[in-house]
Image (spheres, rainbow, N blue to C red):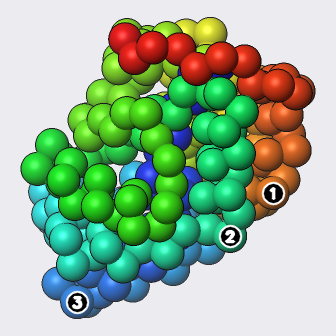
Amino acid sequence: MRIGIDIDSTLHHYWDHLSEVLRRRHGVDLPYEDQHTWHVTGALSPEAVSACVLETHTEEWVLKGEPYEGAVDTVRAWHEAGHFIHITSHRSTDSHAVTTRWLEQIGLPFDELYCSYDKITRCLEIGIDVLVDDSPVNLARAADAGMTGATIVHPWNRELIAADPRIVHAADWAGLATELAPVLGATGGEKEAAA
């Protein structure tokens, strides 16, 4: 099968990075557990938040990302089973090189890396079967397009998970691997050529 995997808040705990930049730049405290929507709302303009997000995608921040426990081992097992691994992130193309370095640094195998602001379009173009992402918007769009949406549970995607039984979910990567096993099959199948 072909598996698309997001990075921020999917492969690593991104919120601490964003929260630290927001606090330093704007004195705003946004505790993880209080983030019940995917978008940062409140006193900051969308432009201010975007500037903070861009900073978190610079070399300094990207290279210090610590993968969630079990994430690399799970993705490696999927890759070794013959699944095509498409890493996809809502990042500027300027961060492609440093993101590649980070993936290599953590030892995560992949067949394609795609940094773009419309990951669903690319997933459809290359025939992704399963999208692992944290965004309720992306998960719903993926499910509506016929993909299996899967996620680690976060405060901002709990409402979607409760409302949409199509979304596979778990508290951590070990649980997610277990929940996705019936979807991915026991053998994984042969790796497909890149589209």
Q: Do the residues labelled 1 and 2 touch (CB within 8 Å)?
A: yes
Residue bearing the label numbered 1: 174
Q: Are marks 3 and 2 in contact (CB under 8 Å)?
A: no
Dot 2: what SS?
Answer: loop
Percent position of residue 41, x then y = 36, 60
Horizontal side of residue 12 vs 126, given as left or right: right
Q: Do the residues labelled 3 and 1 touch (CB within 8 Å)?
A: no
Dot 3: what SS?
Answer: helix
Horizontal side of residue 137 vs 97, given as left or right: right
Viewer-nearest residue: 143 or 95: 95
Percent position of residue 30, x then y = 43, 78
The correct choice, above or below, for 41 with respect to 77 in the image is below
Q: Which residue is drawn at 71% across and 33% down?
A: 81
Residue bearing the label numbered 3: 24
Percent position of residue 93, x then y = 15, 43
Q: Nearer the viewer, mark 3 or mark 1?
A: 1
Q: Residues within 10 Å of mark 3 (few under 14, many from 20)?
A: few
What amino acid is found at the position of numbered circle 2 in the picture? Answer: Glu
Does residue 49 show up?
no
Q: Residue 69 carries which label?
A: 2
Q: Residue at x 31, y 43 (%)?
A: 90
Q: How crowded is mark 1: few (under 14 residues within 10 Å), some or many (20 or more)?
A: some
